[in-house]
Image (spheres, rainbow, N blue to C red):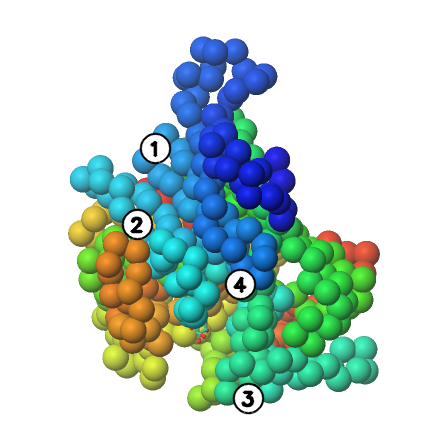
Amino acid sequence: MKFRFVSPAFISLIVAVVVFSCGSGKQNNNQTKSKGKMKVESKVFGNVDGKEVYLFTLQNNKGMSVSITNYGGIITAVYTPGKNGKSEDVVLGFDNLQSYLDGHPYFGALVGRYGNRIAKGKFVLDGHEYTLAVNNGENHLHGGLVGFDKKVWEAEPFQKDNEAGLKLHYLSKDMEEGYPGNLDVHVTYTLSDMNELKIEYSATTDKPTPVNLTSHSYFNLTGGEENVMNHEVEINANRYVVVNESLIPTGELRASSGTPMDFSKMQSIGSRYSQVDGGYDHCYVLNKDSNELSLAAKVVEPQSGRTMEVWTTEPGVQFYTGNFLDGTLTGMNGVVYKKNYGFCFEAQHFPDSPNQPDFPSSILKPGETYKQTTLYKFSVQ
Ligand code: GLA
């Protein structure tokens, strides 16, 4: 069933009916029961520019659920158990659409057409200079003024054995926010019965264009009880992208060993945080030489026992520790989002790649298919 822009009567029908149980149809009853029930529930979340917006909740039978709205493809909540068995929300987000419309720093959003910054919003491609919308000082950030995080995506929930998911589709028109080419984007979220949330991205274009899609969830594995300084983090990287005071890469990839930037061994976020100017907001160069799905980072929150692994096909991961949060936003469950109340692992190509000839290319050409996968895996220790 596709959720396009449908009538109110149809919405009521959807709300009443769209509860999918995994294994229905082709499996016999015993198999269905032994495999448990994975569900996708949906409800109307609101309306943007005359288009209906939904909230879909994927639920497995290991106590995990993930809520996603087709406004911005935003992950609004991720409930996952701690060592006491209690499932709590481990991402920053809101329980109503209006709070997202009022403005927020990309909580849980699908970011595109280009994640992170492009210096001065300019780049040259095939001899032509393009000028993008500028929304971060003099720079372009996360796709511009109206990035993919603010678009209403077409949505189609699905369920399979031991998986439940949501397919999203958006057509970004030629010159949207200044980018060349019609970019046809598909993103699939899948929750497994192994407590893995997989995000698969694919895109095609009719003109060469930069593409760098990412997911901008802010995690707090305590369930929002305190800031993230006691979370322990390991990143599978020995180098990071050096940036200037506007967070634009200088072009240097610097070794992190022996510095406060070094997370090659498990370290708490807070242990050296005060030694890093402005806090962590850096792209790490993952230790890999191909685009295989590989482990990028591990996080342990000692009090709840929750752990998270990040796997990705991307060459980099932006580690951001919510340095710009300032307590002005209150989220789900009444948690005030103060400085450092969440951390992000945004798997992506390096910032400003269109202007950095030595970085892995982020240019997609007609006839090619952009394909990336990122996986967040939760467990308890
Ligand atoms: C990314 C950037 C940060 C900040 C956040 C959103 O992580 O690197 O500098 O812009 O997004 O607030």
Numbered disc 3: secondary structure: loop
Instruction: Please give the name of the residue rendered at 57% of the width and 38% of the height, measured from the top-left corner.
Output: 10
Which of the two discs, 1 and 3, sits closer to the camera?
3
Where disc 4 sits, the SS reads helix
Pointer 1: what residue? Answer: 62
Identified by mark 1, the residue type is Lys
Mark 2 residue CB less than 8 A from any atom of ligand 1: no
Residue at 56%, 35% (x, y): give it. 158
Residue at 41% of width from left, 36% of height from top? 59
In terms of depth relative to the viewer, which is nearer, 265 or 233? 233
- Mark 1 vs mark 2: in front: 2
Q: Is there CB contact under 8 Å for labels 2 and 3?
A: no
Disc on res. 149 = 4
Asked if 184 appears above or below 80 in the picture, the reply is: below
Please give left or right for residue 85 compared with residue 7 in the image. Answer: left
Q: Which residue is mark 3?
A: 138
Specify whether 93 is left or right of 339: right
